[in-house]
Amino acid sequence: MNIEKKKTSPALFVRQVRQELQKVTWAGRREVFVSSAIVILLIILFSLFFLLTDQIWSFSIKKIIQIGSGF
C-alpha cells in the first residue's frame, strides 16, 4: 500500500487557498448581529437559571441541616 503524496509549492498552496476563500459564503452584518444577540440572550437566561437553581438547592440544604441539628 504505497500512497504517494503530491508536494505542492507554497505559491500554489496560497493560490488554492485564495480560490477556496472566494467560494465561501460569508455571513452578512445583520445575520452576525442576530446570531450574536441570540447567544448573549441565551447566556443570560442560562446564567439566571443556574443562579436560581443554586439558590434553591443552597436554601434547601441549609434547612435540612437546621432540622437535623435541632435548631
Image (tube, rainbow, N blue to C red):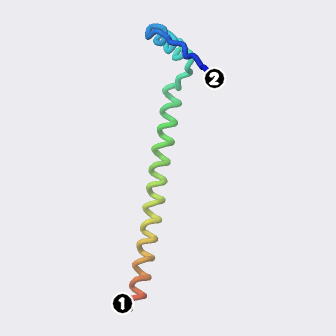
Task: Look at the image and tell me in which quarter the C terminus lies.
Answer: bottom left
Q: Nearer the viewer, residue 16 or 8?
A: 8
Where residue 41 sits: x, y (%)? 48, 46
Residue under label 2? 1
Q: In the image as oriented, which residue stretches furthest toward the bottom?
A: 70
Where residue 24 sits: x, y (%)? 55, 20
Please determine whether, in this image, residue 70 is positioned above or below residue 47: below
Disc 2: CA contacts within 10 A as few (<14), some (14-19) or many (>=20)? few
Among the 4 quarters of the image, the one containing residue 56: bottom left
Identified at 51% across, 35% down, the residue is: 34
Q: In the image as oriented, which residue stretches furthest toward the left?
A: 71
Identified at 42% across, 87% down, the residue is: 67
The label number, if any, that marks residue 71 in the structure image: 1
Please determine whether, in this image, residue 19 is positioned above or below residue 58: above
Where residue 63 sits: x, y (%)? 42, 81
The secondary structure type at the circle numbered 1 is loop
Please determine whether, in this image, residue 20 is positioned above or below residue 41: above
Where residue 2 sits: x, y (%)? 60, 20
Q: Nearer the viewer, residue 4 or 59?
A: 4
Disc 1: CA contacts within 10 A as few (<14), some (14-19) or many (>=20)? few
Task: Look at the image and tell me in which quarter the N terminus lies.
Answer: top right
- Amino acid under disc 2: Met
Q: In the image as oriented, which residue stretches furthest toward the front?
A: 1
Identified at 40% across, 83% down, the residue is: 65
The secondary structure type at the circle numbered 2 is loop
